[in-house]
Amino acid sequence: MNDARPIYLDYAATTPVDEAVAAAMAHCLGRDGVYGNAASLMHEPGRRAAAAVDAARAELATLLGARPEELVFTSGATEADNLAVIGAARYFADRGRHLVTTRIEHKAVLDAARRLEREGWQVTWLEPDGEGRIDPASVAAALRDDTVLAAVMWVNNETGVVNDVEAIGRLCRERGVLFHVDAAQAVGKLAIDLARLPVDFLALTAHKFYGPKGVGALYIADRPGVQVQPLLYGGGQERGLRPGTLPVHQIVGLGAAAARAREELPAERARLTALRDRLSAGLTALDGVFVNGGGAVRIPGIVNVSVAGVDGESLFASLEPLAVASGSACNTTSGEPSYVLRALGRDDRLAGASVRFSLGRYTTEDEVDRAVGIFAGAVDRLRRIAAPLGGRAA
Amino acid sequence: MNYGAEVLTLFHEAAHAGQVEGGTSGRARGRTGGVEVVFSAGVAGGRIARMRYGALGCPWVIAACEWACRQLEGGPVAGLGAVDAAAMAAALAAPAEKTGSLLVVEDALAELGRALAAGVDCDDRKIGQQS
């Protein structure tokens, strides 16, 4: 057993809270801080809380190229995805009962769409190509006269592959179909300008870009015909779309994280791209290691590899002190091989023997090099253990 | 997956991973192909002088193979029959969902036992050549 400190390479699962963000949040909690109820505008503590929420909303809007009034705070991307998919479907149920989405969405979209299927909706499930991309033409071909909504993720959480949401959104808009984008892995990593993009809904969460867990937002484009039915009732906050007392400290944390992300995005993008390429080169120097989505445009910071000739569970048990993910962290409790990698055509063994490395703000070149060494040592050892089986095991 | 200390020790040490050159072998593979095990052994005077394994499987499988070798090496060939999935599960405190994988290990041991029973004299002549 190695008792060294973990080498954290699981930033796509979550990130540590930025120290300045944590300080801004802490300021909201105590008696001397911004502790008021943001709906209590009749007194000063309430007005200060409302002002803090407004400021955070403005920061997030600036990061996204949106208008502040187009943002609804939620508990995270899962709730935002549900509000967009189920909320829009129910609002426009008299227009049609057909949705289009993909096999590689996060469970927050998959399960919301499945829920609608159980309610009688028809769902067209699109397959990715061999690199994990959703072809805009496949979306166009799936749209019908009764299609209410298409939902396609911007960046896949397992492979980091970037979908062409601009092209897909344009096709949806031409057909009068609402378009939802799960951007949990895109915000803070890609430059986003929603004023220019044909996107109607966009879900995000703070904890993917150094903000706190438990807060996110849904962008709802301020244009005619873009509506959702709320999933919760009571209180009227967030224009009645997401009622409940606003968690001011969480929202302030989201706003502070957005401001920080905007400042550092260009430099961090270049740095992470270089680190990703270094990691990728080190991993693929080994025989039988394949980068999933390696031929597609990917965000900097994610490298997902499949390894031939080893068992996935044994590989993970050998990777200490690396903190990495097997497929999607959100999916690891099931013990099943990644549905995303299977959709890319990997068989169960290869999908099971896949590792997602995701780099972030605190990742160093030295950590990347150590990660390559640990990974190579583990793969070599497990292949030696399997060697007496001969070629059949590989 | 939470592994016990015993499983982790056996998995990480894997001191008996390898092959007995010229030895007798027994092999088994799970139905889905996710687990595959081969044991090889050399016998002298009715005892298992040397025993090795190759395995493709989860840490429980590798730990079980290692544990079986440690139990059986140096003992009588007849001892092979006593090491079954239940014994391995008990020794490693394996969860019920690993029973299928341990049965593959048991099958490979049984195959080795059958092979040794059929050719023990031949293997006796090769003990000195084992790696």
Image (spheres, rainbow, N blue to C red):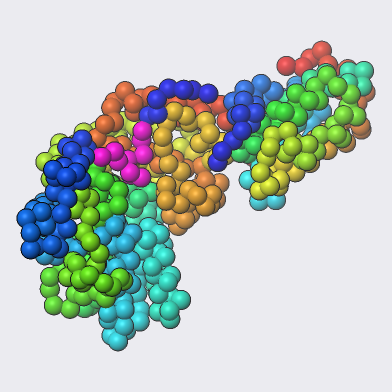
Q: Eyeballing the image, is A160 above or below A138?
A: above
Identify which residue is drawn at 66% across, 44% down.
B95
Q: Position of residue A154 (x, y in %)?
A: 27, 56
* Residue that appears at 42% across and 71% down: A115
The answer to whether any part of residue A37 appears in the image is: yes
In front: B98, or A233? A233
* Magenta residue check for A10: yes
Q: Is residue A267 magenta?
A: no
Q: Nearer the viewer, residue A206 or A371?
A: A206
Magenta stretch secondary structure, dominant: loop
- Please, which residue is most extreme toward the top here? B128
Question: Which quadrant of the figure has residue A211?
Answer: top left
The correct choice, above or below, for B122 with respect to A87 in the image is above
Name the residue: 78% across, 36% down.
B87
Report whether residue A294 is seen.
Answer: no
Locate residue B118 relative to residue B99 in the image: left or right.
Answer: right
Percent position of residue B100, x then y? 71, 47
Q: Is residue A373 left or right of residue A257?
A: right
* Residue A250, above or below A391: below
Identify the residue at the far bottom of this view: A94
- Name the residue nearer the viewer: A37 or A156: A37
Residue found at x 21% / y 78%: A176
- Magenta range is A8-17
- Percent x, y of residue A285: 41, 30
Q: Residue A261 appears at what percent x and percent y?
A: 16, 43
Count of labels shown? 0
> Horizontally, is A319 left or right of B32 in the view?
left
Q: Is residue A353 above or below residue B12?
A: below
Q: Quadrant of the C terminus of chain A?
A: top right
For residue A35, side relative to residue A133 (left or right): left
Q: Quadrant of residue B92?
A: top right
